[in-house]
Amino acid sequence: MSDTNSIGLHSGNASQLAEKLNHLLANYQVFYMNVRGYHWNVRGTEFFQLHEKFEELYTDLLVKVDEVAERILTLGHQPVHAYSDYMTLSSIQEDKNVSDGQTCVKGVLTGYQTLIELQREVLALASDADDEGTAAQAGDYIREQEKTVWMLGAYLGK
């Protein structure tokens, strides 16, 4: 009897990866809702620019939520899907009642920095498990989000 899952990965490694991906999924969900809230509630002279940018960002985050959940399923496990689980697992905290543009952008920057850190952990686990699919997904997200972090930092004058 083989100790591999349907895509040929060691079952123990797949379990570890799915657990870490569920943490990532929880962070994506909380971050998505934060950015959605920034979109709805931002006020001030930069409203039009930030309102549009936040919509672009939350739309992309929603796609990634689905992709991460589907990767967990591909590994043979179940993605968490209750907000109570997200709040327990997420390092990113809810950001409530924020309307100042600079504060919203700082929240976005911090959220992406947290995601990048988690995705590097996923990438290391996936590499050790010879899981090219998860490694490629994490690597693509990191590359894209590092550029976003740089741009957000430039926006904030950092």
Image: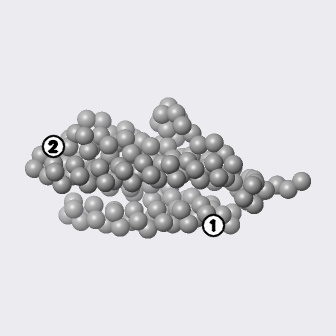
Q: Which residue lies furthest to the top in this view?
A: 84
Relative horizontal placement of residue 123, taking residue 106 as reference (left or right): right
Q: Position of residue 34 (x, y in %)?
A: 34, 42
Crowding around mark 1 (Cα neighbors within 10 Å: few <14, some 14 to 19, many 20+) is few
| Residue topped by disc 1 | 132
Residue 102 visible in the snapshot: no
Q: Quadrant of the C terminus?
A: bottom left
- Amino acid on which disc 2 is placed: Arg
Q: Where is residue 95 in the image (x, y as percent from the top left)?
A: 32, 39
Relative horizontal placement of residue 12, taking residue 99 as reference (left or right): right
Which residue is nearer to you in this view: 3 or 23? 3
Residue at (39, 57) in percent of width and height = 113
Is residue 97 positioned above or below 69 on the image?
above
The disc at residue 43 is 2
Q: Where is residue 111 in the image (x, y as percent from the top left)?
A: 38, 51
- Amino acid on which disc 1 is placed: Glu
Q: In which quarter of the image is residue 2?
A: bottom right
Q: Is mark 2 on a helix, strand or loop?
A: loop
Relative horizontal placement of residue 66, taking residue 42 as reference (left or right): right
Q: Is mark 1 on a helix, strand or loop?
A: helix
Residue at (22, 39) in percent of width and height = 41
Which residue is nearer to you in this view: 2 or 121? 2
Residue at (52, 62) in percent of width and height = 138
Indicate which disc, 2 or 1, sits on the residue closer to the N terminus.
Answer: 2
Residue 135 visible in the snapshot: yes
Crowding around mark 2 (Cα neighbors within 10 Å: few <14, some 14 to 19, many 20+) is some
